[in-house]
Amino acid sequence: MKIARITLTNFRCFENTEVKFHPRLTILIARNGAGKSTLLDAIALGLGSFLTRLPGVSGLSFKKTDFRIKPDGKQPAYMRIRCETFDGVVWDRTERRDKAKKTLNEILPAVGLKALNERVDTFINAHNEDEPYTLPVFIYYGTGRGVFDVPMRKRDFKNKFTRFEALDGALESKTNFRRFVHYFYDLEERESRLQKEHRSFDVELPELSAIRLAIKRLMPQFSNIRSVEPAGIMVDWEKQYVDVALDDDEYDPDATSQIKLTPLPESSNVKKTEIHQLKIEQLSDGYRTTLAMVMDIAARLAEANPFSTDPLASEGIILIDEVDLHLHPEWQREFLPRLVDVFPNLQFIVSTHSPFILQSVKEGELIDLDQINVNAAPDLGKEMSVEEIAEKWMGLDNVQRSALFNKQVAAASHYYALLNSGKPASDPEVAALSEELDTLEKYFGDNPVYVALLRAERRKKAKEAK
C-alpha cells in the first residue's frame, strides 16, 4: 500500500494543493516555512485513519492549530486531507470549524473513510481467522528523532507484542526508542530459548536476523547488536584509521589525534582496525539517530510480518523530515540510496536542505514546494554538481563564493552605481556604503593586493564624483 497523491484543503499553509508521489522515493525541498514538514504531517494524519481502525492501535487526530488562517484572521469552514493509493483506494478526513448548521452547508461533499476501512478490515479479518496476510507499515521520523528515551533499568518491560502493535504510535514524529528496547529484549530472550532447544548458537530468530541484516547492509561498520544490563543496547563499532609512514624528522611523538602517527620501516600507508564497544547513546548524533532509525524500521517490519521469509521486503510508507539531520556530507552522499536499497518495497517520502542528498539520488521524484506548480519538478536523474543543484534547485546565487564575498560584491556594485549616476561622494548613502566596504575589506587581509586595488579604485571614483 503506497500513497499516489494527497490533496490538502485549508490545512495550515495550504489552501488547496494536490501533490503526487513516486512509488519508491519522493524528496521535498523548499525554503524554511514553505510547508515541507506540514506536508509530511498531513500524510501522517491521512494514514492515521488506517491505524485507528486497527484494534488496540492509536492513530492521529486533527488539532485546532491545523486550520489555515485566512487573510482576515478567520478560519475557513473546514479543513480536509484526501489520500489516494496507487491501487485505487481513496479516502479523506474532514474537520469542521464548528457544529453550526451554516458551517455544515459550506462544506463540500466528502469521500469519507469507507474504502479505507474496507481495506483495513481485510487485515483484521485475516488476523482473526488465522489466515496469512502481509501488513503494511507506516512510520514517521520527525526532526526530534535524535532525542532518546533509553530505559535505565529493566523494569516492567513488555513481553508480548501483537502484529498490529507494530504500527502503534508509529506516525508520531518523535521516535519511541524505549519501545524498541522492550521489543529487542523480548526477541533476545526468545532467541536464547530457541538456541537452548536446538543446542546451537547458530540458530537465529527471524525477527532478530532482519534487524542484524538491515544494519549490516546499511551501516556495515556496526555489528553484534545486543542488550546490556541493567538496560540498553550496545553495538560493536569497527573503526578504521591509517598508520602514516613518516620520515624521522616529520614524526612527532607528542602528537595527539584520531589518526595514529607511527613511523614505519618501509613505505605505504596501512589501514588499521579497532573495535569499540559502545552503548547506542554514546554514539555521535549522526550515527545514533541513523542506527536507531534503521533498527526501528527493521523491527517494526519484522513485528508486523513475523512469518515472512524476508521481513525487510515488506511494504509500507516511511516519512522522514530532514533526512540529512546530523549527517556528515560524505555520509549524506551515500545514505539515502542505500536506505532505499535495503528496504526495496517501502515508499520513502523525505524532506531535505542538502544538495548532497539530491546529488546522490538518481531515481525518484523531486518536489519543490516553492514552485507554483509543485508537481513540475526537476529531473533527479540528471548529473549535476552540488553547486548547480544549490543554484538551480535551491535558489542560491554564486555558491562558489562565501556569503561575505557576495555581500562585498553587492555593496561595491551599489557603491559604483551611485557614483556613476552622478551622486557625490559626500552623499549619505554613498558615504554609508563606503564605510561598509571599509569594514568588509578587513576580512580580506590575506589578499593585500586585492584590497589595495579596490581602495585605489574607490578613491579614484570618489574624486571624479566630487
Image: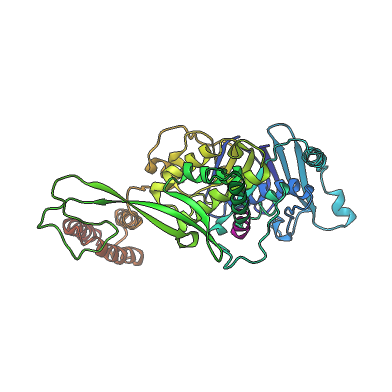
**Residue stretch rendered in magenta on the structure:** 177-184
In this rendering, the count of numbered labels is: 0
Which residue corresponds to the image point at 74% horizontal and 48% vertical from the top-left? 51
- Any part of residue 316 in sight: yes
- Any part of residue 284 in sight: no
Quadrant in which the N terminus appears: top right
Q: Position of residue 230 (x, y in %)?
A: 55, 66
- Residue 134, by quadrant, is top right
Q: Farthest residue in the left direction?
A: 249
Figure check: 104 above or below 133: below
- Residue 89, by quadrant, is top right
Image coloring type: rainbow
- Residue 461, by quadrant, is bottom left
Q: Farthest residue in the front direction?
A: 199
Figure check: 73 above or below 353: below
Which residue corresponds to the image point at 44% horizontal and 32% vertical from the top-left? 382
In this picture, residue 68 sits left or right of residue 227: right
Find out whether residue 110 is within the magenta segment: no
Closer to the camera, 231 or 357? Answer: 231
Closer to the camera, 436 or 79? Answer: 79
Closer to the camera, 173 or 449? Answer: 173
Magenta-highlighted stretch: main secondary structure?
helix
Figure check: 134 above or below 430: above
Q: Farthest residue in the right direction?
A: 101
Figure check: 26 above or below 181: above
Find out whether residue 178 is within the magenta segment: yes
In this picture, residue 182 sits left or right of residue 408: right
Q: Position of residue 111 (x, y in %)?
A: 81, 40
Quadrant in which the C terminus appears: bottom left
In this picture, residue 413 sits left or right of residue 73: left
Q: Position of residue 148 (x, y in %)?
A: 55, 62
Q: Position of residue 7 (x, y in %)?
A: 69, 42
